[in-house]
Image (tube, rainbow, N blue to C red):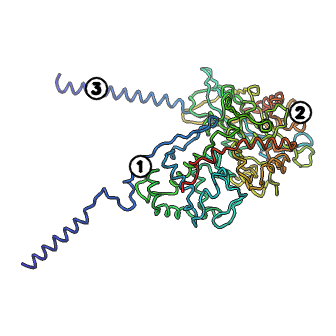
Amino acid sequence: MGQWRKLNIGLWTTLSLVIAACDFDPSEPVEGDLQHIPYQPESVTLTVPESYPELEIPDDNPFTQEGIKLGRKLFFDPILSRDSSMSCSSCHQPEKSFTDGLATSPGVDKVNGRRSAMSLLDIGFQNRGLFWDGRSSTLEIQALLPIEDPVEMHFNWPGVVERLKRHPDYPMQFRKAFGIPAVDSITKFLAVKAIAQFQRTLISSGKSKFDLAITPGSGVFFSESELRGFDMYFDRSGGRLPDAECFHCHNAPLMSSLDFFNNGIQPVRIGQVFDDNGLGAVTGSPAQNGMFKAPSLRNIALTAPYMHDGRFSSLEEVIDHYDSGGFPSDNKNPFIRKLSLTSQQKSDILAFLHTLTDTTFTKNASFRSPF
Amino acid sequence: MTARSAFMDFTVKSLFVLVMVFMVSGCDKQEKATENSQLNLSFSARYGAVPFQTLQPFPMGAIKSIKISKLDFYLTGFTLLSPSGNIELADAALVDITGNSDQDRTVSLKGLKSGVYSGIRFQVGVKPDLNKKLPKDFKSDHPLSSTSHFWEAWNSYIFSKIEGVLDTKGDKVYDLGFAVHTGTDACLETLQIDKSFTLTDQQTFALNLDLDVEKIFLQGGQYFDLESSPLNHNPSNMPTLKLFATALAGAIQLKN
């Protein structure tokens, strides 16, 4: 009888323990589950200067407050680099219109890349190929590359994603931005979507002196020198001043045609081969060797040094180059020719280029580091 | 009414409704199918008798030779010609003869009504109602969104770009860059291709067009003197630009 009683007690105890173990409360978060965090993304409409084209947003990556916030944090966070020493902002600094002031930039291994960091101003409008050689078609694709580039962050995406998953804040921010159900749902594709959302917000204020001077009723006027530069830049003088041929590649309103050109800065080596073949190396077309993207000239005074390899340290050197006509080659843009500008005319063009400075953009607190 | 006759009545009514639904959906399909054809205008280029290639040298008379690095042009105002009524299309296209792929040299006109047509008419350049617009008025995948093909000083699209280098002395040194950019309504040219073709539902018909690049420079039996006038893109050069616009349209013909 005593044995039966002991067995009975034992059975009841075991049963109670089993029931207690099965007593799962669905309201309590399971490790890695994020569904208890509300997913209520707020859509965003950005202000674009009136003269600009529409900012096109990919259907699969709509703007949200939460996405932009996450992208901004990722952009300024060195967590993306192998030794956590570099972020996107190391080479793209807001106060320098998202360049770094260097001819070429060192990566985490202190090895320099071969091309200069491009300005990110108005990058969301660059829909004809990103990078100097146009090798990426979208900001989302572009943002995948620097992480694993040996001369940039020299890390790998699985490593980045692991760090993001373990981070105390990022999982929650990914949930708020993209509605992911669990930490394991964080992917590199979501990370670059967020970064791209932030980058698309980097829009000119439309308040540079140039913008205001060409707006009737603004009360802002070019100086005489700036006006002469403006006329030469756009060939508006009716023959009174020389055509400096600038607008062919750097057309308004973005001050970039978004196109690719050989601007005569490299001599031909053999045949149609250059030290850096640029676009031609991407497309495989020798006729496009030596061609590079015409960058926006907005904030150009803040983005020295110049050209794809940072060879010119000042705008004066750049103007001298275009005045000289550059090195001959079969696909050099024909408007890059000997101009024979006077020193006054060069100064006038320089003065005009300075009117493209947009400090409202560089001082925008929304574009600064959140850390 | 008995239960049986009520059932019969219901069945007949149901059948009638079903037949009507099928008929209507059948008609709908037929109507959609008539606007599902495609016409491709496929350009191939040559320089005289020689197939054209970007940056290949071609003779310009006895001494000089030329290499073309850029040759593109807009086509707008497409009209399908038919005895039962012409059909105007809203399409615009940028044909890039120096582009990397066949797609750059092909105009695809989609969603066309199937039927028999006697030809097609189009304008080489940007027709006035579109030329009043700005690149920012178009989505980035539209040919007219290209700021590279718009000149503010003209307030016009650049209808065609012809760029390259010239060997002026016959020493194989291509020392003179040249450019011809046409634009403004005055440079618009109309071209009509008289060729009977049938567009069939969900099928693509290709009209093969031939561009003789040499003819662009060979005007009135003589090569245009690029040496004297290498850069032609200013309204002050309008007579020259009109010459080139006319020559470009004249260099396009149906390929045999």
Dot 1: chain letter: A
Residue type, label 3: Val
Specify the quadrant that holds the C terminus of chain B.
Answer: top right
Q: Residue A109 carries which label?
A: none
Label 2 neighbour load within 10 Å: few <14, some 14-19, many 20+ = few
Q: Distance between the residues labelled 1 and 3?
A: 53 Å
Residue at x 59% of width, y 36% of height: B204
Q: Label 3, on which residue?
A: B12
In the drawing, does residue A51 fall left or right of residue A165? right
Label 1 neighbour load within 10 Å: few <14, some 14-19, many 20+ = some
Dot 3: chain letter: B
Residue B122 quadrant: top right
In the drawing, does residue A313 fall left or right of residue A66? right
**Label 1 close to label 3 by CB (< 8 Å):** no
Q: Hey, which residue is sitting farthest top in the picture?
A: B84
Label 3 neighbour load within 10 Å: few <14, some 14-19, many 20+ = few
Give the mark toward the camera: 1 or 3. 1
Residue B153 quadrant: top right
Q: Label 2, on which residue?
A: B222
Q: How far apart are marks 2 and 1 (CA)?
A: 72 Å
Q: Which mark is residue A39?
A: 1
Name the element at disc 3: helix
Question: Between residues A171 and B251, which one lies in front from this camera angle?
Answer: A171
